[in-house]
Amino acid sequence: MSTGALRDGANSYQQRYPLAAKMPGRPWTVHLADDEHRYQLACFDFDVKDGASRVQPELVEQAQDQADRLVQLLGDLHIPHVLCESSATGGRHVWMRTLGIERETMRTLGMAARNLLSTLDFGMLSNPATGSARPPGAPHRDGSMSRVLAGDVRDLALPSLAVSQDQLEALTDRLAALAPPLQPEPHSPITSGDSRENASPRQMPAKNVARFQLVGGGPDPSVNAFICLLAALSAGWSFDDVARAVQTSPGLEHYRTRRTTHGRRRRPQHETAAKLAADWDRAVDIHALNEFVPLRRAGTSEPAPDVDELAAQLLTITDLQTSFRVQPGRWGGNDGSPMQRAILTAIAWLTLHTGRTEVAAATRTIAEIVGVSSPQVWEHLERLRTSGLLVRVDGGFDDKAPTWRLAPHRALSTPSELDRALPSEGSDEATPRSRSAKHLFIERRRVLDELQAELLQIRHDVFSYRGGLGQLGARLWVTLGEHEQLTVAETARLVGISEMHAAGLLSRLRSLKLARFISGAWVRAARDLRTAAARRLGVLGRLKARAKKYAQDRELHAWWLDHERRRQGQAPKTRPEMFDSRGRPLHGSRVPFKHRLFPRFPIRWDGRADYASARERVQSQRVYGQDEFFAVRVELPAFTPSDPLDDWSPENLYGSETINRLRRQTRKEPLPHPADDGLLVDLPW
């Protein structure tokens, strides 16, 4: 047993005593594992505080719903348990009696539960050395105490009611199976003849429809409602469509009512609108980020990566994350290290999402994921490649993007947590392949969630350069959210900059209402006002404008490559059959599905490619217009010997002075004369 005293606004449990018959009169905890690091108890802690240790009403409701869901799963598996209210803030503890469970088994269970239950803090389930929790009846520093809500505390002291190894594995499998998919269920492609205009955006797979029809929002109304928003975005719904569905859809019960001690009560209309708008903005950000992941076809399952390859990927990425955490000076400062950290995070996220060690990612794609411009990304990609942290497998050619690979494990000096989780094959501690595979896939989901959360925080207009706060400002804002409070010196050390520079950035965050100075320390603002700050700085909408420009650049480049193939006498290349998240072809806004070929590239009257006209047509979305799909041509009369040849010469068609000037400028051969059997001439317009 451990006891502790209040210190600096947080509980500090430093004194260690054996378990006594009489409980101490101050806050105390009980260790979950014994001296041999085998778990004798398991505690699932559902936290209601954010990263800055502030109680959030939204988290209170989610924690209580998710604790009830875990209790329901335990009841279905006939596992004895005790549900407690941890303190007056509304947090929940779910206790189980175990008997000598190994660290890896408990850690895998904790990660599987965290992947499904977002408010769960599974740190104590993965740290047998110091992992502890306040048991039922123990006082809290705010004056309240842990109160039993369901179950019998005496069951926790009976070894006969301990959870078996098979029950824990069954619980782990159930939790892993219930975790939301990495991507929303893909939609069926539009059938031939449908266009983007006449195809209904409301059709969605049966699995997504079932979520909208869950009575009462299911066992976890808040999570189910948010997944419904992601499904609606994938189907092309607008905010107004979702707002109308909230009034009648059973699966969106979370927005109509809220949880209270006397059951669910209807929310005021303004609270429903505010909560729906906040969740919609968050869903839009996640949906926009997932657009960079290759979409799987409807009716197919997510590809399962090779277990050995996935183990190597996780070793490399967790090693990289450890370096981010313990070496702030290496990834901070003014030399672009925050940008390099963001780039490595993006490539690691793509690696785990695709399941491939080598990922093809264009510079513009990485720039859009991170939220900066492509020239900046290219510069730091070269620095990472030179330093050995990133390997460029293929430089890219034609319409293929460069292929990148993270440096192998041990390129960084810090050890990885997975080294102990996956012993070598020849050792006596090697776990069975099935158990290792289960652990790997659960670990993959946890790491993906962490990488995505970091990308979502730094990917915003306010953190863009040239008017924004930049990646260093983003790193400082994220660091504030990970701590309850920080001084200027602590902030400078964590971000890797000087105290003077840190003070200047903190002051700027304060002026934008992104940070606050309270009692001699800095904290992140309780409300996320990044959008308002971007509007104030004049950079709001910059990421959308950049994404639109990059999409036009990709379309123009693909069109030009098709033009080059035509010039070389090759057949026009059929564009790959690609679909967006709505299941619609990515060929422009007005192209029918059956038209998958580029039209002819605009040509000036001197025979050169007209890039200005092509870009104008791409920007105005007239590449595939009905009247411009095929080049406009005029059939000239057939040549006869009686006709003077000079009548159809280039000089007579365009003027001798113009032709001579073009010959001097371009040093090209004279334009060919028409054939004897007629001529088809592309008109200049």
Image (spheres, grey):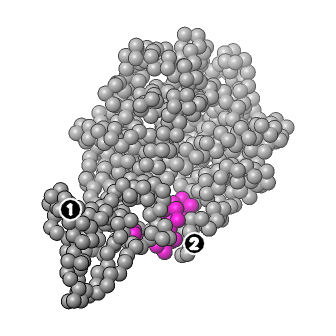
Residue farthest toward the right in the current orientation of the protein:
262
In which quadrant is the N terminus drawn? top right
Q: Residue at x 20, y 77 (%)?
A: 646
Question: Which residue carries the number 1 mark?
Answer: 657
> Could you tell me if residue 25 is visible in this image?
yes
Q: Which amino acid type is shown beneath numbered disc 1?
A: Glu
| Residue 341, placed above or below residue 644 | above
Q: Secondary structure at mark 1?
A: helix
Circles 2 and 1: CB atoms closer than 8 Å:
no
Q: What amino acid type is highlighted by mark number 2?
A: Asp
In front here: 36 or 337? 337
x and y percentages locating residue 204 in the rendered image = 63, 63
Give the residue drawn at x 45%, y 54%. 619
Single out the residue that lies furthest toward the bottom: 641
Q: Residue at x 29, y 81 (%)?
A: 679
Which image quarter: residue 49?
top right
Q: Which residue is mark 2?
A: 194
Where is 412 relative to 655, above or below? Answer: above
Occupied quadrant, residue 601:
bottom left
Asked if residue 112 shows in the view, the reply is no
Residue 290's disc number:
none
Q: Magenta residues?
A: 579-599
Circle 2 sits in a helix, a strand or a loop, which is it? loop
Please, is residue 329 above or below residue 547 in the view?
above
Cα–Cα span, label 2 and label 1: 50 Å
The answer to which of 109 and 334 lies nearer the viewer is 334
Of residues 291 and 535, the one drawn nearer to the viewer in this rendering: 535
Q: Is residue 197 left or right of residue 220?
A: left
Q: Position of residue 352 (x, y in %)?
A: 42, 50
